[in-house]
Amino acid sequence: MLQVNFLRDNKERVLEGLKKRQFRNLELVDEAIATDDERKRIQFELDSQLSESNKISKEIGLLMKEGKKEEAESAKSKTAQLKESTSELKSQLDVKEKELINILYQLPNIPHEKVKSGASADDNEIIYQSHDVEGLGEGAIPHWELAKKYNLIDFELGVKIAGAGFPVYLGKGARLQRALVQYFLDKNVEKGYMEVNPPHVVNEASGYGTGQLPDKEGQMYYINEDNLYLIPTAEVPVTNLYRDVLLEEKDLPIKNTAFSQCYRREAGSYGAHVRGLNRLHQFEKVEIVRIEKPENSYAVLEEMVEHIKEILSDLELPYRVLRLCGGDTGFASAMTYDFEVWSAAQEKWLEVSSVSNFETFQANRLKCRYKTDGKSQLVHTLNGSAMALPRIMAALLENNQTEEGIKLPKKIAEYARFDVIN
């Protein structure tokens, strides 16, 4: 959530940033500033009346001691009037504060200056590509056919149990999933991330803290009886570990990694592009989360990018890195890099990771600050997928198919304890 003082002091920059995103409700910026002005006016009047009321209350005691009952009664009458007035002002203040929050919740983060303007994924910048890519040629088959051929994943059985988008992994398919998770976690821990095992459900406050609510409410699974949400990513519970926390400067940086199941309704997703593992309602992912001092966060973002590149190199997959344009950058992010691997059988790029810097946007919602030089200020939060499994699995199966079977990359074969699927 943007701070209203930031909107007031950097209005032109804010408007330009929102235009980069193709955000149309620019009038919300003026509405937020005007609402905050009115909130401040009410607060000032309330504080003045409370101060006057306290002053008169002290005078009443002195007047009674001096035997000036008539003057004391007049003062009591005035305090009663002030009490009624301050009660009304408190009510008005509460309304204005809620109005302001509701406006601010509608404003996305302001993109970093390096993020270019754009309307969709077509406008994203390709920053790096590891290999020239080509299809596997005649006879190559997509991962959903490979999964059936080698009895790795049963999509129909998942439909029977839960519905489309909930696959059942079998045999070497299940073992490969487990090996990938362990490899990703170990890789992250080697880089200094502390592993945590968070809940897979969160409350409403946690959803608001990281920006899933109210922006993505329709994409989350909701448990009505308990007012809880199934997590769309481990980012949500892990980042919320630091909600309402005042950190010491010596505590930073904080580096966490977590494995979780992820649940996404993916409402409105239909067609060939969602076939097989391309888009699921339940999938496994390993996440990395950073809590950083503001002056370090963009160097850290580049460090995280290099970390993901190293993982993909170990997987021996052709990949590319994109910096998202304003219109394709997520609501809460100031800058995002996407990683895509080449699906040789489908002959298209598949997104497998996003690494983002949210600057203070999440921290402001979370009320996560750190003390420095006797003052407190908001931290910067960052997160990334290291990695999401479904499309990694799809690319591994498709890119490594041979006449003898599917040959695993050396690093993963060590974890899976088999090097070929046949």
Image (cartoon, helix red, strand yellow):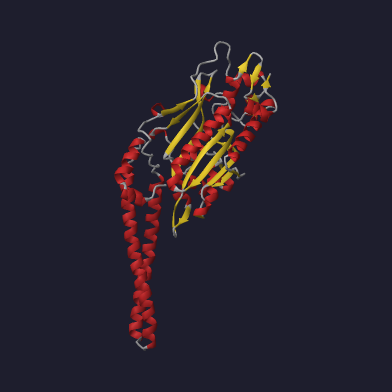
- Pick the front one: 195 or 223: 195
Residue 341 percent across, percent down from the top left = 52, 25
Q: In the image, is 17 to the left or to the right of 364? A: left
State the residue at coordinates (38%, 39%).
112
Image location (x, y in percent) of residue 338: 47, 32
Is residue 421 at all visible to an observer of this figure? Answer: yes
Expressed as whole percent of the image width and height from the top left, the position of residue 368 reads 48, 52
From what the image shows, is residue 2 above or below residue 71?
Answer: above
Q: Looking at the image, which is closer to me, 299 or 241?
A: 299
Residue at 34 percent of width and 57 percent of height: 39
Task: Return the residue nearer the eye: 79 or 408.
Answer: 408
User: As displayed, is residue 172 above or below residue 367?
Assistant: above
Answer yes or no: is residue 221 visible: no
Q: Where residue 399 sits: x, y (%)?
A: 57, 20
Q: Establish if 251 lies above or below 412.
A: below
Q: Is residue 280 left or right of residue 328?
A: right
- Would you identify the image quadrant in which residue 390 lies? top right
Farthest-out residue, bottom:
67
**Most extreme residue toward the top, as rendered?**
138
